[in-house]
Amino acid sequence: MARHIGPVCKLCRREGLKLFLKGDRCFTLKCAIEKRNYPPGAHGQRRSKHSEYGLQLREKQKMKRLYGILETQFRSYFRMAERQKGITGENLVRLLEQRLDNVVHRLGLGASRAQARMLIVHGHIRVNGRRVTIPSYLLRAGDVVEVQPASREIEGIKAALEGAKKRRVPSWLELDAANFKGTVRSLPSKEEMAIPVQEQLVVALYSK
């Protein structure tokens, strides 16, 4: 499974906003954006103007980093979104939201998408009663996601659920915290997919 292995706080600083890549730490004053809200590197504090291409590239990088996926897989999602009916940008975000690692994170079973991926790969998550170890598994309306009974005493999962109480679970998901379980009530609508990315710029970049 390809993944980013460098310092993730630098990714947030490069994009100029919190991507919530380190779980609860992102909600504290220890967050890198709170300390140094400018791009990393020797020239990070210089003001620079972006070209049209530069703006499109930044939005694409932001979306990739937010969901924790690399270029080849991201292009694959874009091609899938193009083939679907509707608006390509909305289709792309919806596909990324349907990923199992994203849903585990959104439900609060994982403090971050990276932690959610780790839980999935290590076999701690079930979908409709069956163990799934593929973070990119696409969920559908009605699917039930839960933590394996034997894994419910893991401190990381319990801490993530405790931290989730401070945040709102999206309306297209339903959490049963007492049973370490969540249900995909429906696929997310445009209003329910509010992320800090202009997806139309991503579509424009790939449509050239």
Image (cartoon, helix red, strand yellow):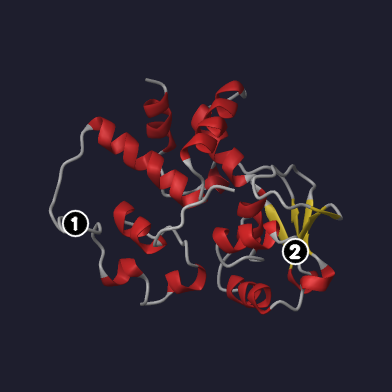
* Vertical relation: 150 (above or below) 1: below
Residue highlighted by disc 2: 124
Residue 125 in view, yes or no:
yes
Instruction: Count neighbours of disc 1 (C-alpha within 10 A) and say few if under 14, some if 14 to 19, many if 20 or more.
Output: some
Q: Amino acid at mark 2?
A: His
Q: Is residue 174 toward the left or the right of residue 70 in the image?
A: right
Q: Which secondary structure lies at badge 2?
A: loop
Q: Is residue 184 toward the left or the right of residue 60 in the image?
A: right
Q: Position of residue 29 (x, y in %)?
A: 36, 77
* Quadrant position of residue 98: top right
* Quadrant position of residue 201: top left
Q: Nearer the viewer, residue 117 or 94?
A: 117
Position of the C terminus by quadrant: top left
Q: Nearer the viewer, residue 70 or 90?
A: 70
Q: Residue at x 59, y 40 (%)?
A: 94
* Alpha carbon distance from label 1 to label 2: 40 Å
Residue highlighted by disc 1: 44
Q: Nearer the viewer, residue 195 or 52?
A: 52
Q: Is residue 171 toward the left or the right of residue 9 in the image?
A: right
Q: Residue at x 80, y 70 (%)?
A: 179
Q: Earlier in the sequence, mark 1 or mark 2?
A: 1
Q: Position of residue 190 (x, y in %)?
A: 55, 40
Q: Position of residue 120 (x, y in %)?
A: 69, 58
